[in-house]
Image (cartoon, grey):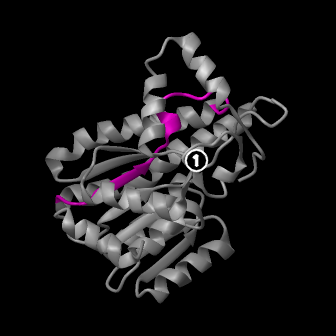
Amino acid sequence: MAVADGAANAAAAGSAPFRSIVITGASSGIGAALARLYAAPGVRLGLIGQNAGRLAAVAADAAAKGAQVESALLDVSAGAAMQDWLAAFEAAGPVDMVFANAGISTGLSPTGTFESTEDARRVLSVNTLGAINTVMPLVPAMQARRRGHIVLVSSLAGLRGLGEAPAYSASKAAIKEWGIALRDALKADGVKVTVVCPGFVQTPMGDQFVGAKMFVLSADQAAARIARAVAANRRLAAFPLPLALSVQMLAHMPERLARLMLKITAFRVRSRAQ
């Protein structure tokens, strides 16, 4: 999907194209795809990631499409550093939209080894606190302007916890519920919030999962679906639909039947490094 198509989708849904956008986890996967999708002349992108080489490549691609790009190597779990960078980016021009997309995963290893306490804490710190660190510094200014769009990238694992990835499931469930509550809390202030719950996506993180993976999307396909959900001001967008419906059914099945279904589609984590 071309970048121009992303702007066209927003316009078709009745929303003006976003001009100043912050994206975390922008050095690969969905974050990189979003950066390339929204990059266009007149668009200012704030890209945050942790892989210097990949982040520079994404920034170069976005700049080649006419966007003004500022990038930063930051750990989203570092609250003070995030606050400072976001404050500086906002001071240079109002932020219209923020994608809290950065995330890591852990879970059962191929040999069945359970995730460690340290791994679980790190996942929750990056995925949950990292999203809060990304969003909250920008909320007061959005409230004052009575406009802005917050996009939180959760996961289908946030709809029904997976035994292979307990901490990851918990972190994504927290983001989903926080985002839905935030949407209600900010509606009167004119600030929009969309929560997206993708299934399996071909990304460096997604490639860590070994096992049955159904309805796998490319990062570009996932980014295009997210852009459509944002343009339509969706409250919650879970995709792909067949897998999303299956996960939602699991949440309401008797436990014994749900465990049987999950056993058939079980996966393991190839590596815990991210």
Image location of residue 17, percent across then percent down: 26, 72
Q: Nearer the viewer, residue 234 or 182?
A: 234
Image location of residue 252, percent across then percent down: 43, 18
Residue at x 67%, y 24% (from the top left corner): 263
Residue 34 vs 136, above or below: the answer is: below
- Residue type beneath disc 1: Val
Q: Is residue 56 left or right of residue 23?
A: right
Secondary structure beneath label 1 = helix
Residue 256 vs 33, above or below: the answer is: above
Q: Which residues are magenta?
A: 146-165
Q: Main secondary structure of the magenta part?
A: loop
Residue at x 65%, y 44% (from the top left corner): 105
Residue 89 included in the magenta stretch of the image: no
Q: Nearer the viewer, residue 7 or 213?
A: 213
Residue 23 vs 171, above or below: the answer is: below
Pointer 1: what residue? 126
Disc 1 crowd, CA 10 A, few/some/many (<14, 14-19, 20+): many
Q: Is residue 169 left or right of residue 70?
A: right
Image location of residue 46, percent across then percent down: 45, 72
